[in-house]
Image (cartoon, rainbow, N blue to C red):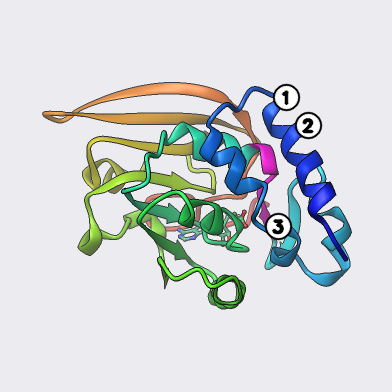
Amino acid sequence: MDYSVARRRMVEQQIVERGVTDKRVIDVMNTIPRHLFVEAGLQGHAYGDASLPIGEKQTISQPYMVASMTAALELQGDERILEIGTGSGYQTAVLSKLVRRVYSIERIASLAARARKVLDKLQVSNVNIKIGDGTIGWCDQSPFAGILVAAGSPDVPTKYLDQLDVGGKLVMPVGGQDKQTLIRVTCLGDGRFEREQLMGCRFVPLIGEQGWKSDSFA
Ligand code: SAH
């Protein structure tokens, strides 16, 4: 099945027409085969304007959200990036084409394994995936020029601020269990940070030491 027409339409209608202007992000999303990141029965929906289930009560993020969060990092190409919540690996694949290296953490081992398999199939070789609690970041590999968190948390885990390079940007959903606000935090140096609110959003919970304690509310 050739999904290239559906993919181009997705990028045009859901991403470009809604105001994402970063050309590199647009070009990459025109090439990554999003249908390979969902199960066979859902492939026909992979280019729709929605998140989709990927098992384990988790979801692959909506294409517009992936584009917006990626663009908000203002990537130039030489960065090392931390991603929290590998999930399907789709966002990871998009990031991998835009930076030097992606460090991605997923707490559910089966999802991490499946994501790794798809990324290998696509010959993506600049991604390190770790299984564990991403709310404490990845200290050994810090500082990062960007941190992208694909799960919602009551507030910004302090370790993310510690692991952000000067000039680096953190993009993540913050708020309650039902809805959050996508925020961007820029590290200005000398312990100073600028915090911006980008848009309302809805993500699965970030579960761990510095996030929600469990997903029992879901
Ligand atoms: N970017 C992914 C989004 C997956 S949903 C995609 O588009 O496919 C969010 C993911 O965050 C889930 O897979 C969930 O298991 C993971 N997650 C939640 N809390 C986490 C934590 N503390 N550390 C790492 N991953 C976490």
**Which residue is rendered at x = 88% and y = 58% of the image?**
44
Mark 1 — residue?
17
**Residues at badges 3 and 2 in contact (C-beta under 8 Å)?**
no
Q: Name the amino acid, label 3.
A: Arg
- Circles 2 and 1: CB distance less than 8 Å? yes
Whichever of labels 3 and 1 marks the residue nearer the N terminus, that label is 1
Residue identifier under label 3 = 34
Secondary structure beneath dot 2 equals: helix
Numbered mark located on residue 13 in the image: 2
* Three-letter residue code for mark 1: Glu
Q: Give how far apart the Cα atoms at labels 3 and 1 are.
A: 19 Å
Ligand 1 within 8 Å of disc 3? The answer is no
- Ligand 1's image quarter is bottom right
Front residue of 61/76: it is 76
What label does residue 85 carry, if any? none
Lower sequence index among marks 3 and 2: 2
Is residue 181 part of the magenta span, yes or no?
A: no
Q: Is residue 97 left or right of residue 122?
A: left
Question: Callout 1: helix, strand or loop?
Answer: loop
